[in-house]
Each structure stands twice: as structure tokens, then as C-alpha cells.
Image (cartoon, helix red, strand yellow):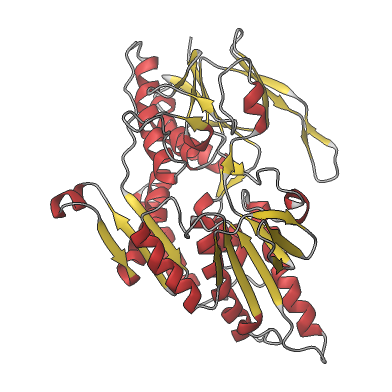
Amino acid sequence: MTHKIVIVGGGAGGLELATRLGRTLGKRRQASVTLVDANLTHIWKPLLHEVAAGSLNSNVDELNYVAQAKWNHFEFQLGRMCGLDRANKRIQLEAALDENGLELMPARELSYDSLVIAVGSTTNDFGTAGAAEHCLFLDTREQAERFHRQLLNHYLRAHAEPGKSDELINVAIVGAGATGVELAAELHHAARELAAYGLNKISPDNMHITLIEAGPRVLPALPERISKPVHKTLESLGVTVLTGAAVSQVTADALHTKDGKVIPAGLKVWAAGIRAPQFLNQLDGLESNRINQLLVRQTLQTTLDDDVFAMGDCAACPMPGTDGRNVPPRAQAAHQMASLLAKSLKGRVEGKSALPTYQYKDYGSLISLSTFSAVGNLMGNLSGKLGGSVMLEGWLARMFYVSLYRMHQIALYGMTRTLLMMLGDRIGRSTEPRLKLH
């Protein structure tokens, strides 16, 4: 009987894994590979801040799961996982509704022999009063596009009222991690571009961007030698950076901090903290932690079931020798886990009992400040030869940052198609606006 591999979640890790397995096991008919996702298309999550600002047109850069499945010998199923029956090796998918609320597909079940859960994470508002009601989040393409529409509406409204000029737009971003920092810089760039296209009744200087961080510095998860130049660059762009400022309440027109500051804001984005989807907490007895991540062993198998694997942001994978710390929720970790599981599942299909173990390798971090700058550090083979990590800034850091997305595309499309896409992007720059204006 054909071994059934089901992968739930078409993010960076899950989609790369389905593509790898489809090209090998699926193509040779050694296993059936099924990818399940609640959406029909994929956008690389680290680029959602560009979608929000309008720098990236999601309709152009999206990947269609149905087409990807056809090209790479796996099956795609549209659906959202809501439950698990481990005894009978079945996952439950909730009913799918169309835009009018009518049932598109009924609730159903899928059977598996090996299950990989790769459902990613969402933003954690830590139960802050008013955050869920008044803040926008950047967890999905739809949320990023909603922010972009609201931003663009401010400009169009001002442009349509002849007597109105120099209107203020106050944008507050909670969380100075990579997403918050990159969004702040990208919004400053968007303000310049919108004015250049004639929507200049709101001048770039009248978009007031405030970046709020509860910790002592921006990019708290990265080395201080990276956060310092980033902080300096943001301030040079006119971004107000508040550190040591924990938000206690969000209202319709402002954010309130625990030390009494009131930050006026018509557009509010919450980009602080992560948590895995809530349904993982009640997944047929599997162990999870306080932020809903599934506990896994070094093989990425869940602690209570050898047939259920978890990877990416939704997995709590311990790092040996780090006093109980888990693998950080980063794109490079998901990519590494996908590579490991491609080998592991191939071994399972071939009847091998021993599985390889995962060890996180930190190759450094890169932060893009739109067209203004980039900064980061490289670790691994290159830095090993030079004795430690290598600090990058400016144009070189920007090139390395862009290469991360190209590597993701190569994993999904192959080298030839990626090169053709790069050529198409180059040609498109002369025929399309530099910013999405709708």
C-alpha cells in the first residue's frame, strides 16, 4: 500500500517540504504527498511588510498551490485543520465557506501514515486591552493588504478634498523586531513614492511613524551591534523610536503605555511576539507549551506520537546545551527543518527505523530598511574562516537580503524558472508603478 504523507500548512517550510517530496517520492510513486492549506496561494511571510506598504504586489509574487502541486507531483487540498484522530490516523478539516458564507466544501477527514504539522504562528498580543479590536496584524496576506488599503484611503481622501492639505497620518507599530523595524522603513519609503505619484496633499514629513518596543532596544533578539545602526538609521528617517515602553491599552485613536505615555495613532499595527494557532492545544492529547507550540524531539517527531511531526514556528524543538531554549521561530529554521524531514520521510517510506536528528544552525540575520539601507551579520562557513561573525551594512547587506528570497524561489521553482522570474521582474520595473496604487 502507498505510504500517505500529509503536510498541513503551506508556509515556507511546509511548501518546500511538499515540493521536495513530490519531486522524489511522489514522482516515483513511492508515496502519495498531500499539502493542506486554508488558502489557494502562498506569499513568503518575511515579505508581508512590503505587501502592507505597497512595495510588493502580492498578485504578481504569489504562488498558486494547485499549479505547484501539478508541476511537482503532489496533491493540494484546500482546507483548515481543526482536529486529529491519532488512533485512526486521520485529520479533520472544517467546512470551507465562500465569500457569501455559503458552504464551499463540507467538513471532511484525510487519512495519513506520516503527518507533518507546519501551520506556522500568529502574532501574540498578550491579551492587551483593545489590541485585537483596534490593531492590525501582519500574519497573512489578507491582513497586509487590508493595512495597505487603509493607508492608501488616507491619501485618496486627502487628494479628493481641494481645501485639505498637509493632513497628518499617525502610524504606530508595536514591536521592534524584524517585522516592525522593516515595516517602519518601508512605510517611510511608501510616503515618498505616494507623493512622487501626485498624492502629495499629505507630505512625506506628515506621515508620523512611531515604533514602540517594550525591551531596552530595537531588534532585541539580534546582537546589539546590529540594533544600534538600525536604531540610528530609523531616527535619521524621522521614525520616532520608543524603547522600554510596554503598551497597556489600545483605543480607537491612541496607544497607552504602562508609564503613562499616550501615542496618537489612526493606523496601529501589532508586530510583537508570536504564538502558534490555538487548536494545537487540544490536538488529541499531544503535548504543547504556553504559546501553543507542539513539543517535539530532535527528530521533529512529537513527544507522544512517532507518526506525527511538527516543524517551523508551531514546533517547540529544544536546542541541546542552551539551558532549555528552543529553536527560534525564523525562516532559516523552517528551511533547515524541511531539508531534514525530506530525508526523514524518505527513510520512513524505505522502512528505515532510525531517523536523523535536527540541529539548528544560525547563519546570521539580515534586516532590510527598504531602499535606505540594510544591516546584518553572517555566520557559518564564511565567518568561521574569518573568526566569528561578519558584519554587513549597506549595498552588500541588501544584496544578501534579496538573495534569501531568491533561494526560497529556487527551492520551489528550480534555478531556470527563478532566473526567468528575475528577468521578468527587471523588465516589469519599467512598465509598472514602483508602488501598488490600488
Q: Position of residue 411 (x, y in %)?
A: 39, 44
**How many discs appear?**
0
**Which corner quadrant of the image does residue 201 belong to?**
bottom right
Which residue is nearer to you in this view: 253 or 52? 253
Which residue ends up furthest to the front in the rendered image?
Answer: 259
- Is any part of residue 282 visible from this angle? yes
Q: Position of residue 8 (x, y in %)?
A: 57, 30
Q: Nearer the viewer, residue 242 or 157?
A: 242
> Which picture quadrant has residue 291?
top right
- The residue depicted at 26 percent of the width and 50 percent of the height is 379
Closer-to-camera residue (308/266): 266
Query: Residue drawn at (50%, 30%), measured in percent from left and top?
Result: 315
The image quadrant that residue 66 belongs to is: top right
Does residue 230 sit above or below 175 in this rendering?
A: below
Query: Which residue lies at the image location 82% right of the left edge and 91% below the top edge?
Result: 162
Q: Quadrant of the C terminus?
A: bottom right
Which percent across, then down, holds residue 21?
42, 30
Residue 208 left/right relative to 47: right
| Drawn side of residue 78 relative to residue 47, left or right | right
Q: Residue 7 in the image: x percent, y percent?
A: 53, 28
Farthest bottom residue in view: 163
Q: In the rendered view, tell whether residue 78 sits above or below residue 131.
A: above
Horizontal side, residue 67 vs residue 399: left or right: right
Regarding residue 402, the answer to whether it shows in the image is no
- Of residues 288 and 406, the one nearer the viewer is 288
